[in-house]
Image (cartoon, rainbow, N blue to C red):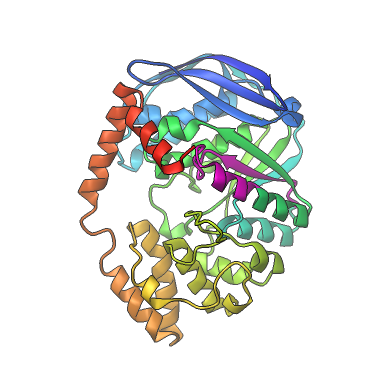
Amino acid sequence: MIIENLALKKDGGYVVLSADCKIRHWKTDRMYFKLDGKFENEIVVDYSPFLASLLIPAMKLGEDIEIRGSVSGKIMESVGLIQDKLFSWNIGLKKINVKSEGLNTQKYSSSKIATFFSGGVDSFYTYLKNKNDGVKTDYFILANGFDINLRNKILWGTTSAHINEIAEKEKVGLIEIESNVRDIIEPIVKWDYSHGGCLASLGILLGKDLKHVYMASTYTFDQMFPWGSHPELDKYWSTESTEFHHHGAEVTRLQKVIYISKYPVVLETLRVCYLNVRGQFNCGKCDKCLRTMINLEIAGKLNDSKTFSHSIDLDILNKIKIESEHGAIFHRENLDYLIDNHKREDIQLVLKSLLSSVGKGDDFKVELLRKIMFYDFYYLGGFFYGLLNIYRYRL
């Protein structure tokens, strides 16, 4: 895998850092990071964001990385440790060699603190817990093209407006960064495994300004399994100027909701839904909405929420499908609490039924789909993937 031809260019009111990435069998992709032009002087112009994004995909392909330019010396020192951890997960990755033409060891006078912020449970917990602990957040970082597909312009517009509103209320700056990273690497390796390095790439990008970057945990320390943002990995993406912190793994998702639901800003703005049903802030029907509504019910705050229905429809709850053991963790937390505290036996019965059939019969289909997606990407240029996205998002 070759990464070369780094360039920083202006595009209207935006600035774009991009590089050619030779990944596919027959073509070169131009990977980019695009953000407001006012941040131009805060960008570190080297290949470090591209290495952070592409290390895991290269390990999946078993291809060495050749970087035709400079990269953070500290990240290069950590590459071996990162690979050791990833290899130990036994998820089909191979150890590779990484070479660069130079090392950027400059330490910039960065001073700001940022946290990745989506307006959901994990990021709200990290922001509010830090605030209460005396850690002032200067910026929220919001990515377009990661959890939100670049083609889904409606969802991006809604989400951007929503996070801007929260940032204004909390008097926190907002950095919105657009990137095509996920489109390029997801056919190679699951986003579940690769998203940590990709998130880190956004903080690395702004290394002249950001001293500390917080990555909100998804799971607790005793729930750890292969997952992209991980307490044993996130710190190794740190550069000479920017330090990454995995935050919040000491508490469960339910405990996070109980903590954050004490704050009016959360009850007024909490958004967890990814379905983007027209005219609805949270659909109240998907897996994430329903498990969060049960969290709020347990916390005694569902009736106070401005972004969720005040009642849980058991018929709708009974129709959801828990796709994996990863997602089942959050439902089991709710079920265990309800059983231990002798509450809502009606919800208990539904959750027991749902958890008895987690992901059954889907492994073969999922693996087959992943193989089709990979060969389409690697040999056909993602032709069918592109058609699918045009159909889904109707540009």
On whether residue 151 falls in the magenta region, the answer is yes
Count up the numbered dots. 0
Farthest residue in the right direction? 171
Against 386, residue 322 (above or below) is: below
Position of residue 92 measured from the top left corner of the image (x, y, whole percent): 29, 36
Specify whether 75 is left or right of 40: left
Q: Residue 137 or 27: which is nearer the viewer?
A: 27
Q: Looking at the rendering, in which quadrant would you find the N terminus?
A: top left
On whether residue 129 falls in the magenta region, the answer is no
Q: Residue at x 37, y 75 (%)?
A: 315
Farthest residue in the bottom direction? 342
Q: Is residue 76 visible?
A: no
Against 21, residue 345 (above or below) is: below
Q: Residue 379 or 233: which is nearer the viewer?
A: 379
Q: Residue at x 25, y 43 (%)?
A: 367
Position of residue 324 measured from the top left corner of the image (x, y, whole percent): 33, 57
> Magenta stretch?
136-160
Quarter of the rendering containing residue 104: top right
Q: Residue 249 or 269: which is nearer the viewer?
A: 269
Position of residue 156 measured from the top left corner of the image (x, y, whole percent): 58, 44
Specify whether 393 is left or right of 104: left
Q: Is residue 317 visible?
A: yes
Against 170, residue 187 (above or below) is: above
Q: Residue 280 or 41: which is nearer the viewer?
A: 280
Position of residue 311 measured from the top left corner of the image (x, y, whole percent): 51, 78
